[in-house]
Amino acid sequence: MESIKDINDSSSLIYNKVIGNPKLINSTVSFTGKNNILFCEDNINIVNSLIQFHGDNSVIYLCYTKSNYALDIHVFQNSLVYMGRDNKLSPTIHINVQEHQNLIIGDDCIIGSNCNIRTSDAHIVYDANTKKRVNHSASVFIGDHVWLAHQVYIEMGVHIGSGAILNNNAHAYKYSLLKSNQLYTGNPARSVQKDIFFTKDYTGNFKEEDTLNVHDYNSRIFLFSETPGETLNFKKIDQMISRFTPDEKIDFVQKLFIQNKTHDRFSI
């Protein structure tokens, strides 16, 4: 097992590596396998976090955000966790990626405190009659400008389109498809309002004149729709990632997610 609590200790890693220069504050990154990579863009703070690689050949890719990363994250065999740029993050975010699946989170999202995202049930469930497995693990995809409010729970195989909102305590049940620009609430999460969008303005700081100024918002920048030649195919992306080495995973996400900023890339 290898672990670090300070980025200066990363030079002691033999079988795994950290790329970048994140500031680790009261945080631990541990590796029980080999050929794993924690990739951090510039100016990243990882605070009060536990980041654990439990197997081999996985990548965690953290993009720049003004927020601190406060993560309780467990990644197992041959997986990718990608967290995009300029997301607003509240502590702590719980992530568990098992059974060689992946988690993709786009840019400009809001993720509230104690959100929980999983790609597996952690144990196997079978149909009593057919004796076939019924709870297959699956990757999770979360688009751009998605708002996960406090204590949202995302199960395996969930796809969330850009612009969607999940209300406090919403529970997105396994394999759910949550469409762009809709508000979801409840357990299981259901759509209660269509054709909506949000901004990241924080109303806690508003004075009366600020409230008056936000009655209207005329831009369509936060409206998303599937666009031929622009919207990505999550299933194909998932299949490609599974074939790549850790270094190839990094190259892939840099080309497809970081260099590609098309507006409707993650629309549903």
Image (tube, helix red, strand yellow):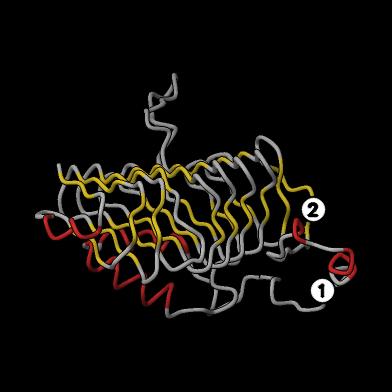
The image quadrant of residue 243 is bottom left
The residue indicated by pointer 2 is 193
The residue indicated by pointer 1 is 217
Q: Is residue 155 left or right of residue 55?
A: right
Residue drawn at x 37%, y 28% as measured from the top left: 124
Of the two numbered discs 2 and 1 on the same chain, state the one appearing first in sequence. 2
The percent coordinates of residue 200 (x first, y second) are 68, 64
Does 31 appear above or below 215? above
Residue drawn at x 89%, y 64% as measured from the top left: 208
Q: So how many labels did they put on this image?
A: 2
User: Which secondary structure lies at badge 2?
Assistant: strand
User: Which secondary structure lies at badge 1?
Assistant: loop
Does 154 appear above or below 200? above
Q: Is residue 141 left or right of residue 188?
A: left
The image quadrant of residue 211 is bottom right
Does 89 appear above or below 174? below
At label 2, which amino acid type do we have? Gln
Of residue 93 and residue 259, the one placed in the foreground of this image is 93
Is label 2 in contact with label 1 (beta carbons under 8 Å)? no
The image quadrant of residue 221 is bottom right
Q: Is residue 13 left or right of residue 156?
A: left
Q: Residue furthest top?
A: 128
